[in-house]
């Protein structure tokens, strides 16, 4: 787990937070520091405990164990309405019987602010979310994106210590979702809001976050910057969950000068490796991203290659996705940009190709085999 | 195109005709389906209502339409007092059912399936017995040596027995119990449609649990309140057996007046006129309630 910047006091600190429902442990000893202004995403498949953890932070569920600390103050026994945590809900939860202005003013009224101050703040917030003329509308008269912006304005109006976003883009169509992601990201950055974002959409998580915490079975298995998560997943679960990857069974054949010799599908790969020496003959899983594989007609002289046949060629717009069958059982997924000069060749089903690894440094090796446990750590 | 068009045209026209026939036969079948209900309503509702109207505007020795019965009743102090009592009693019973039912419905939406079933069972059970049996039970409970007085005297809360049986208070209690399920079910229905995150949103914005309840849950339950209140009011103002048995004839309500006119004095014109006045007053109160309820609704133009 990457430590957060030490120079700043964390806005949120989770210390060994667990939440159990009877015999089921939904959140299992989660610790996390979130620095002021940081955007951290809880990412995981449904049922991984991310929503439960969010409820523990918000105060709707008491943690069974551990502490929720907000700006040096333990929050475990603080009622949710006194925590000053703003939440944007999945379906926005705008009050349908109130106008947009009344929705935005709600939190300020609960704080008993002066009437004129509230009116000014509401106008300011609606300008901020680019809905200045919508004060007297009702939520059902707004589009999904507009409702989302009102929900943001309502939460930001009270200047919360922490902003929680609970899958807020799930109800929007794809194009609008991407627009709103950018808008929210910019808005949150502009205000320097410390934000926890819950999603099961990894693209969304990668695009928006300073750090991504991958949750699995109630635990944070890896918490790091998006590119680190993608390039150096800490275990097979993360490797499999984030992006697409070829997870291939391999066998260690020996080491030499910081390089690990691994045999995959009959081809020896020399993978740079700084970790301890592994015994020869050990079974491992080798992860190669599809974009780290290249196809060529001619056999490369300088590097090992697999001989295969293209069994699938899919257009996805900017990228061609291929599946190449190697030998009897091996299927390699390869993706190549269509517009690059050196890979301008577009392959078709049935083409005979040589598959090579572009960058051996980006190959990851894990204990175990592809059928085995996902909790193994990387070398 | 070099192929002649006729065959295709033909097929188009036949399929069009088939479609038209299909629509027509579907309409026919729908119409046939509602026929029994329509006939039933005409025979047992529209015709009797017409007869009520007819009796109320006819008088012996007068040819054509007369308003003599309406004039007689609406200038009769006893009648007006009874009408007032009926309306007041029904509003009071509705209010009691609402005050009891609202927290119960709220509790219901927050409990697990076992407790939900328990609440439904206990509140709906009285509907499974007849009004007569239920009223006898209330006589046992409310009587001079009944359950309530035994407890009151036994705990020293009162010195002597409190008179509940054959009083308006006793009738209020008994009627409120019957109306509770009719209030509860629409309320539960309305509250279950509310997104639980609405209250969470209010709380996260700084509202205490209680304020979130009154600012969000209560106004958004208005459709259920209106539906439950209308049902409860309409059923109470037309209740006959409970006021007669638990009230013991110590006072009159509109249904007892109608009964006396129709069965005891055989004055069908007065009975019909009384019934029509009751109907109009009840409709007016219901309409007023709906208008009031609409002001709490989501906003202009919402369903």
Image (cartoon, coloured by chain):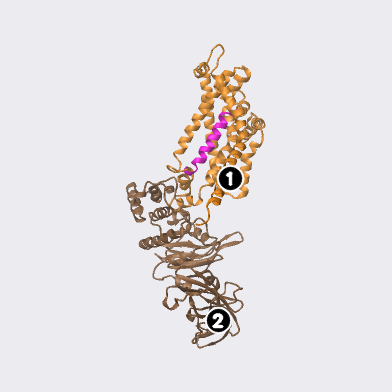
Chain colours: A brown, B orange
Which one is closest to the eye, mark 2 or mark 1? 1
* Chain at tag 2: A
Distance Cα–Cα, label 2 vs label 1: 61 Å
- Front residue of B99/A140: it is A140
Viewer-nearest residue: B166 or A107: A107
- Label 2: few (<14), some or many (≥20) within 10 Å? some
In this rendering, position of residue A113 left or right of residue A288: left
Provide residue A140's location: percent of width, then percent of height.
44, 48
- Residue extending farthest top: B61
| Percent of width and height locating residue B40 | 62, 31
Image quadrant where residue B21 sits: top right
The residue that disc 2 covers is: A307
Residue A131: horizontal and vertical position, in percent? 36, 52
Residue A379 in sight here: no
Q: Are marks 2 and 1 in contact (CB under 8 Å)?
A: no
Same chain under badges 2 and 1? The reply is no
Q: A17 or A192, which is in the foreground?
A: A192
Q: Residues within 10 Å of mark 1 (few under 14, many from 20)?
A: few
Is the residue B164 above or below the residue A169 in the image? Answer: above
**Residue B18, numbered circle:** 1
Chain of the residue that carries numbered disc 1 in the rendered image: B
Position of A115 compared to A350: left or right? left
Looking at the rendered structure, the secondary structure element under dot 2 is: strand
Q: Residue lying at the far bottom in this picture: please name it.
A: A256
Q: Is residue B243 above or below residue A304?
A: above
Q: Main secondary structure of the magenta part?
A: helix
| Label 1 element class | helix
Extent of the magenta region: B219-239
Q: Is residue B116 magenta?
A: no
Q: Nearer the viewer, residue B245 or A136?
A: A136
Question: Residue A76 location, x and y as percent?
Answer: 49, 59
- Can you say whether B254 is above or below A363 in the image? above
């Amino acid at each position: 787990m990457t430590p957060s910047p030490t120079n700043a006091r964390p806005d949120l600190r989770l210390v060994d937070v667990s939440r159990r429902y009877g015999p089921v442990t939904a959140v299992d000893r989660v610790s996390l520091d979130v620095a002021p202004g940081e955007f951290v995403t809880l990412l995981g498949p449904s049922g991984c405990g991310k929503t439960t953890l969010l409820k523990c932070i918000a105060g709707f569920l008491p943690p069974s164990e551990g502490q929720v600390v907000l700006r040096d103050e333990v929050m475990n026994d603080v009622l949710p309405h006194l925590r000053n945590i703003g939440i944007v809900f999945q379906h926005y939860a705008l009050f349908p019987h109130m106008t947009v202005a009344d929705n935005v003013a709600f939190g300020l009224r609960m704080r008993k602010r002066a009437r004129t101050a509230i009116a000014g703040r509401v106008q300011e917030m609606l300008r901020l979310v680019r809905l200045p003329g919508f004060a007297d509308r009702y939520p059902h008269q707004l589009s999904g994106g507009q409702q989302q912006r009102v929900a943001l304005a309502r939460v930001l109006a009270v200047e919360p210590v922490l902003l929680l976003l609970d899958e807020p883009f799930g109800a929007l169509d794809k194009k609008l979702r991407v627009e709103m992601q950018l808008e929210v990201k910019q808005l949150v950055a502009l205000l320097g809001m410390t934000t926890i974002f819950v999603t099961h959409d990894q693209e969304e998580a990668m695009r928006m976050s300073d750090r991504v915490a991958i949750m699995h079975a109630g635990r944070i298995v890896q918490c790091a910057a998006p590119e680190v998560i993608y390039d150096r997943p800490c275990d097979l679960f993360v490797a499999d969950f984030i992006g697409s990857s070829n997870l291939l069974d391999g066998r260690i054949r020996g080491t030499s000068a910081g390089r690990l010799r691994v045999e995959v599908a009959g081809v020896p790969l020399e993978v740079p490796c700084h970790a301890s020496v592994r015994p020869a003959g050990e079974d491992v899983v080798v992860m190669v991203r599809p974009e780290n594989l290249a196809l060529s007609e001619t056999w490369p002289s300088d590097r090992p290659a697999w001989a295969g046949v293209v069994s699938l060629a899919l257009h996805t717009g900017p990228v061609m996705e291929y599946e190449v069958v190697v030998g009897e059982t091996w299927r390699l997924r390869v993706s190549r940009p269509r517009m690059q000069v050196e890979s301008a060749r577009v392959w078709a089903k049935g083409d005979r190709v040589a598959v090579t690894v572009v960058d051996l440094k980006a190959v990851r090796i894990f204990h175990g085999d592809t059928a085995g446990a996902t909790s193994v750590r990387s070398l | 195109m070099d192929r002649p068009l006729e065959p295709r045209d033909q097929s188009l026209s036949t399929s069009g005709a088939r479609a038209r026939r299909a629509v027509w036969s579907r309409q026919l079948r729908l119409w046939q389906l509602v026929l029994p209900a329509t006939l039933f309503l005409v025979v047992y509702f529209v015709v009797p209502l017409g007869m009520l109207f007819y009796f109320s505007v006819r008088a012996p020795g007068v040819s054509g339409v007369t308003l003599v019965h309406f004039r007689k009743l609406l200038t009769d102090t006893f009648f007006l007092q009874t009408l007032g009592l009926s309306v007041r009693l029904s509003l009071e019973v509705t209010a009691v059912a609402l005050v009891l039912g609202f927290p119960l419905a709220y509790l219901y939406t927050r409990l697990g399936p076992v407790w939900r079933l328990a609440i439904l069972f206990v509140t709906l059970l009285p509907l499974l017995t007849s009004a007569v049996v239920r009223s006898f039970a209330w006589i046992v409970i409310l009587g001079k040596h009944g359950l309530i007085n035994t407890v009151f005297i036994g705990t020293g809360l009162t010195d002597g027995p409190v008179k509940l049986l054959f009083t308006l208070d006793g009738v209020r209690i008994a009627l409120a119990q019957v109306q509770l399920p009719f209030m509860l079910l629409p309320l539960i229905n309305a509250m279950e449609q509310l997104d639980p995150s609405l209250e969470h949103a209010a709380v996260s914005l700084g509202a205490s649990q209680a304020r979130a309840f009154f600012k969000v849950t209560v106004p958004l339950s208005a459709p259920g309140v209106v539906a439950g209140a209308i049902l409860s009011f309409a059923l109470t103002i037309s209740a006959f057996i409970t006021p007669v048995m638990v009230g013991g004839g110590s006072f009159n309500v509109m249904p007892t007046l109608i009964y006396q006119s129709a069965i005891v004095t055989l004055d069908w014109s007065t009975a019909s006129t009384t019934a029509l006045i009751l109907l109009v007053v009840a409709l007016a109160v219901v309409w007023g309630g709906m208008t009031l309820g609409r002001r709490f609704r989501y906003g202009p133009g919402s369903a």
